[in-house]
Amino acid sequence: MIITVASGKGGTGKTLVSTSLALSLGAENVRFFDCDVEEPNGYIFLKPVIDKSVKVYLPKPRVNIEKCNFCGSCASACVYNAVAVIKPMAGKTKGSVLFFYELCHSCGACSLACTQRAIHEEPGEKGEVETGTAKNGFFFAHGRLKPSEANPVPLVKAVKKYAEDGKINIIDSSPGTSCPVVQAVNGSDFCLLVTEPTPFGLNDLALAVEMTRELNVPAGVVINRSDIGDSAVEEYCSKEKVPVLLRIPFRREIAVAYSKGIPLVESSPEFREVFKKLFYDICSIVEAKRRQK
Ligand code: SF4
Ligand code: SF4
């Protein structure tokens, strides 16, 4: 089973929920994946011993300018505007083909479009996947996107490859509803959406719910700091028939412990049973969805 923990916006407590869920379920069957590859922070709470690091490479286009006739087909083919062709000016400048690798998605379209065979591909480092064992014994993996790299999706894919059938695979996605989040949520059995009871929380939750519907992934909501703010998130969930599976009240001691890297279920052990029940509720929803198929 794959459970992805996501949130429409940052700072709602997504990692607080994902790490506490993992820590509540025992070490044997759990595998934890931090797919927030631009800013992984699950390790702060799970304190893994990392024993393996694998670099992730993607093809990067290079040009042999001697073969180029400056036709511009490569630039036209690139939907990411990652190529610019500068035509030569007789007697003044040599032409050139410039690749903006921060924008390049390694799609290969430019080399396919080049009839002169002037473009070839070389491996370019995207980042790395580190794997190891969390402090309480379960498998841990996270991705680290190389600074200056723009597209985290391939690294999210690389982290997810470590998920195993028959295990409880818990994925902590990046916040928002952009491509890396879609990549993290896609193919999950369930998506837990963490939000807060504020107008911003509601707005971003609604976008996240739409995303899970597009991906046909069943979803449920965790409302963090549930006793502050307003009731609009509850009303929205009721109207949209999205179950609210857990409410975590605001407590100063939880926030203080969290700021020191202490997971919720360690600072407030009574939450272990709460998170176990959350897991069983998720299993019931997943099972009901399977029966409908
Ligand atoms: S498509 Fe090939 S030949 Fe044309 S400008 Fe690009 S690299 Fe040069
Ligand atoms: S590989 Fe794709 S994204 Fe990168 S420069 Fe070529 S066409 Fe653009």
Image: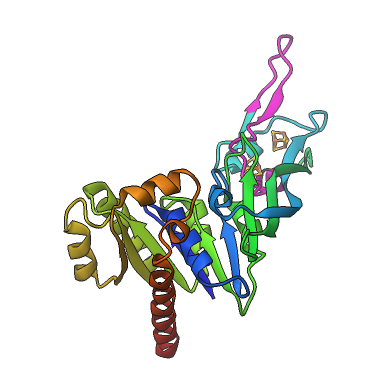
- Residue drawn at 46 percent across, 54 percent down: 15
Magenta segment's dominant SS is loop
Residue at left offset 42%, top offset 79%: 280
Position of residue 275 relative to residue 144, above or below, is below
Front in this rendered view, residue 187 or 64: 187
What x and y, as percent, mark residue 75? 61, 36
Residue 217 rendering spot, x and y as whole percentages:
43, 71
Q: Is residue 35 above or below residue 25?
A: above
Quadrant of the image containing the N terminus: bottom right
Q: Position of residue 32 (x, y in %)?
A: 58, 63
Relative to 68, 286 lies left or right:
left
Left or right of 146, for residue 174: left
Residue range corresponding to the magenta coloring: 85-113
Q: Quadrant of residue 66?
A: top right
Residue 216 in sight? no
State which quadrant residue 249 falls in: bottom left
